[in-house]
Image (cartoon, rainbow, N blue to C red):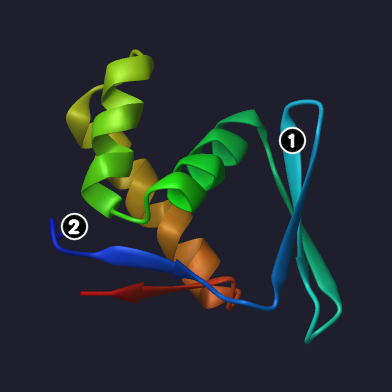
Amino acid sequence: MKREKKVHILEHILTQTVDEESILLDTQRELYFGLDAIGCVMWEQLERDPSVEALKEYMLAHYDVSQKELEDDLVHFLNHLVENKLIRLER
């Protein structure tokens, strides 16, 4: 994961949070995706600050997780969002 990467949430994605979960609606393809509580926290942080490095630092500061485990989880999470055309990663 490179420090300079930024996340661009695509403009046709709407978000609704219910309890501790989020639903992402792709208005172009009329598909929705669910995020669990941790995914919801990560998404909200990306909405506040699109920096991948800032997200990593936030999660390390607020959750009891090793840096390696978190980096693996972030790569998986971000790749899943990219594959489903919910975000675009930019340098």
Mark with earlier residue (2, 1): 2
Q: Which residue is mark 1?
A: 21
Which percent across, then down, holds residue 87?
A: 50, 71
Residue type pointed to by label 1: Glu
Residue type pointed to by label 2: Met
In the displayed structure, 21 sits above or below 35; it is above
The answer to which image quadrant residue 55 occupies is top left
Q: Residues within 10 Å of mark 2 (few under 14, many from 20)?
A: few
Q: Residue at x 19, y 30 (%)?
A: 67
Give the SS element for disc 2: loop
Q: Which residue is mark 2?
A: 1
The N terminus: image quadrant = bottom left
In the displayed structure, does residue 81 sit left or right of residue 91?
right
Q: Residue at x 58, y 78 (%)?
A: 85
The answer to which image quadrant residue 90 occupies is bottom left
In the displayed structure, does residue 88 sit left or right of residue 10?
left
In the displayed structure, 56 sits above or below 89; it is above
